[in-house]
Image (cartoon, rainbow, N blue to C red):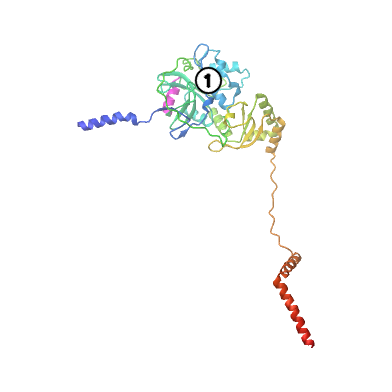
């Protein structure tokens, strides 16, 4: 190999890193021809905090984000509630503190503990705002290893995207392989979902601004807020757990598939206070409207929900079935405060729709013979008034008189 070839190889090898595509990209909700699956406006992102022992609350911050996403009002304020308790988190601790905060056990979190990538794909297809462990080492948000929990909002063959509560307002894009390695790097891969429908379809006129944020320089991890997942804590070896009880992988996948089918139906959304929602829900629970419950996807959101800032109005909203872009027009809307009687009347119209009466086209009417005679006379009368006709008739009469007198003579 001569000197020219050696120099050429050195040049190509030095340029290779510049030509290679970056493995990680911090930016907006769209990148490289793809958009994220679960778009949550940046103004709604929560920032991580610490508990009373200065350990991070990323587990509970991510879980509250998932609750806001789907309108679970029992999870609102969970991060601030945990500020008065020790930080860090693991599955048993999450279930224990949710029972303390919600004694009626209305919050049921599904835990996955075995790093199954297919579970993530199915959960996102069911529009779940998935909470996942994340090990860092991306060179953008974290240079070294961290014990952290974030929200996974996209997972395709080309890209995986997380929304990090230490960096609200940004999304971190990476290859699926890079994400899986950092997810499974903490105790094999822990994920949480709520198993309830996500937000209603977007309105046709609503758009979100896709603005790419320039990736910052590599940042050293923050001291306390980033570490919230406690490694090495005792945890059961069951692959899936729901409400503290083991559940099979097949049953989880069946529930996710049913949830995905349910969200393709027309959407009935209650946007109001908890008292209003209870009153509306009581009307819907009447046996008369049981068929409507099976045909629609029912959702509940607080009256000051993030949906209001996306174009929705407080009250009861019925939308058509979503299209491929998961958008749907509003069929009708009862403004808040809408009473139970108003909702009942509207539901009865949906149950027994009034079809418009058919309007038969009028055939072309052919006038009868006796009807045409006056028309003909009127036409003759108009023609008889013409001056040329009058002079012709007058000439005929004068000429006739002339010949009659001549013949008499």
Measured from the top left, where is residue 244 in percent x and y?
Answer: 56, 19
The count of marks equals 1
Q: Within the magenta stretch, is there residue 181? A: yes
Q: For mark 1, what is the residue?
A: 61
Tell me residue 390's x, y (percent).
73, 73
Residue 228 within the segment the image draws in magenta: no
**What residue span does the magenta drawing correspond to?**
176-186
> Quick one: 136 or 378, which is closer to the camera?
378
Location of the N terminus by quadrant is top left
Image spot of residue 127 (x, y percent): 54, 30
Majority secondary structure of magenta residues: helix
User: In which image quadrant can residue 379 be found?
Assistant: bottom right
Q: Residues within 10 Å of mark 1 (few under 14, many from 20)?
A: many
**Viewer-side residue, 406 vs 321:** 406
Is 16 displayed left or right of 403 in the figure? Answer: left
Q: Is residue 241 visible?
A: no
Q: Quadrant of residue 219?
A: top left
Instruction: Name the residue at 74% across, 76% down.
Output: 394
Identify which residue, 217 or 125, lies in the foreground.
217
Residue drawn at point x = 73 percent, y = 77 percent: 395
Q: Quadrant of the C terminus?
A: bottom right
Q: Nearer the viewer, residue 116 or 205?
A: 205
The answer to whether 211 is drawn above or below residue 236 in the figure is below
What residue sits 66% from the left and 32% below the top?
335
Residue 246, percent across and down?
54, 22
């Amino acid at each position: 190999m001569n000197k020219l070839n050696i120099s050429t190889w050195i040049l190509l090898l030095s340029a290779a890193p510049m030509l290679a595509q970056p493995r990680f990209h911090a930016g907006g909700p769209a990148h490289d021809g793809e958009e994220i699956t679960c778009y949550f406006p940046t103004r709604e992102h929560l920032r991580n905090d610490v508990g009373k022992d200065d350990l991070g609350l990323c587990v509970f911050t991510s879980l509250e984000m998932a609750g806001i996403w789907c309108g679970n009002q029992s999870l609102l304020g969970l991060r601030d509630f945990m500020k008065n308790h020790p930080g860090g988190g693991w599955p048993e601790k999450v279930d224990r503190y949710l029972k303390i905060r919600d004694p009626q056990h209305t919050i049921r979190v599904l835990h996955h503990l075995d790093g199954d990538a297919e579970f993530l794909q199915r959960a996102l297809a069911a529009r779940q705002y998935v909470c996942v462990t994340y090990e860092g080492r991306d060179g953008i948000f974290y240079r070294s290893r961290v014990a952290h929990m974030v929200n996974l909002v996209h997972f395709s063959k080309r890209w995986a995207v997380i929304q990090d509560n230490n960096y609200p307002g940004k999304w971190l894009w990476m290859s699926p392989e890079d994400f899986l390695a950092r997810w499974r790097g903490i105790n094999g891969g822990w994920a949480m979902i709520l198993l309830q429908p996500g937000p209603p379809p977007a309105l046709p006129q609503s758009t979100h601004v896709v603005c790419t944020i320039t990736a910052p320089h590599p940042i050293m991890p923050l001291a306390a807020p980033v570490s919230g997942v406690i490694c090495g804590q005792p945890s059961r070896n069951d692959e899936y757990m729901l409400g503290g009880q083991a559940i099979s992988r097949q049953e989880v996948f069946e529930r996710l598939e049913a949830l995905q089918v349910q969200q393709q139906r027309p959407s009935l959304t209650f946007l109001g206070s908890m008292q209003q929602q209870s009153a509306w829900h009581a009307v819907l629970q009447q046996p008369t409207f049981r068929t409507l419950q099976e045909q629609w996807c029912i959702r509940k959101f607080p009256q000051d929900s993030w949906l209001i800032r996306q174009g929705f109005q407080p009250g009861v909203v019925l939308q058509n079935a979503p299209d491929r872009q998961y958008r749907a027009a509003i069929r009708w809307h009862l403004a808040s405060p809408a009473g139970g009687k108003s909702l009942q009347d509207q539901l009865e119209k949906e149950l027994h729709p009034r079809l418009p009466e058919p309007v038969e086209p009028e055939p072309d009417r052919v006038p009868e013979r006796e009807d045409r005679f006056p028309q003909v006379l009127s036409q003759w009368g108009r023609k008889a008034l013409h001056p040329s006709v009058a002079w012709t008739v007058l000439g005929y009469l004068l000429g006739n008189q002339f010949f009659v007198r001549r013949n008499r003579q």
